[in-house]
Image (spheres, rainbow, N blue to C red):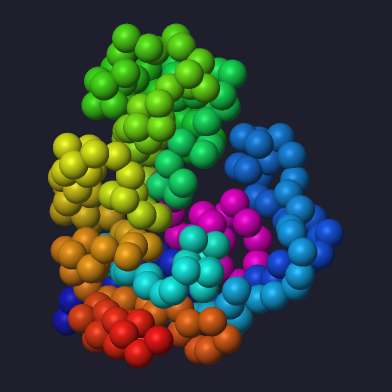
Amino acid sequence: MPPKQKDAIVVKDVGIKFAINRRRRLGVKNLLIEGRTATTGVGEYWPFRHVSFRVKKGESVGIVGRNGCGKSTLLRLVAGVMLPDEGTIRVNGGVGAMIELSAGFVGDLSARENVYLISSLHGFTREQTDARFDEIMQWAGVERFVDTPVMHFSSGMRARLAFSIVTRMEEPILLVDEVLAVGDKAFRRKCGDVIDGMLGDGRTMLLVSHNESDLRRWCQRGIYLRREQEPMEGPIEDILEMYLSDVDQS
């Protein structure tokens, strides 16, 4: 009998609330990068509650749902950059988070300095980053601008650099939020090839996307987040069918 797959991610009865003038509890990574806490806007609501699921090591799972249902928020909770108001999340292994590519950059710092900062947050030593540095810059195509503050980069340059950094951190768990929705066709193709290779190496992925072909390409299983309802879980084709049916009926 083959050995039972271990869980990479365990989400149990998780919910999060946004409220008037309440300071949002952020994880250590956000505090280090942003240097501040965050407050919410007007109103009080739960994007989701009672969300539970498991992702096995080596499995790729897609998350679908309407805008505002909390898909990106759920990825931030798994990444540890936000904390839930209820429930627990257990992640067994390092996480490479491709969420809002380039959002974690410090604008006043150069590309070089940002590479070393983000690498250090992933636990890499300077020597380990040195060994990857040239490859990171070459893949991103920004070698000429290595000592330029990233505030002067175009959005495409920032996205390429962020993707190149995270994918070379060799973390076993990938959290991907609409990465292929940014950049031109060539960039999306390059990103897709990299993700293919990482999944081929046995990485685990949690993918948020509205792109049906990407979900079918990479995911075996899906989770359908629905506002004020229990999430649905099953084979990706079944989940897409339910989601698209609901969209067509609205």
Quadrant of the snapshot with the N terminus: bottom left
Frontmost residue, 160 versus 89? 160
Q: Answer with the quarter of the image where residue 212 lies.
A: bottom left
Q: Is residue 26 above or below residue 237?
A: above
Residue 128 placement (x, y as % from top left)? 39, 24
The image position of residue 147, as x and y in percent, is: 44, 9
Q: Is residue 124 left or right of residue 173?
A: right
Which corner quadrant of the image does residue 12 belong to? Answer: bottom right
What residue is shown at x 52% (from left), y 22% (from top)?
151
Asked if residue 119 is positioned above or below residue 241 in the image, the reply reads above
Q: Quadrant of residue 25?
A: bottom right
Residue 145 at x, y = what percent? 37, 12
Q: Residue 169, can we see it?
A: no
Is 68 left or right of 6, judged from the image as shown? right
48 left or right, relative to 112: right
Front-most of 154 and 8?
154
Residue 58 seen anywhere in this rendered image of the structure = yes
As drawn, which residue projects farthest toward the right?
A: 21
Q: Is residue 158 above or below residue 149?
A: below
Asked if residue 172 lies in the magenta stretch, the reply is: no
| Bounds of the magenta segment | 75-97
Q: Residue at x 39, y 80 (%)?
A: 224
User: What residue sits 57% from the left and 86% below the top?
Assistant: 228
Q: Is residue 91 magenta?
A: yes
- Where in the figure is residue 31, as x and y percent of width and height? 68, 41
Residue at screen point 32% across, 18% down: 142
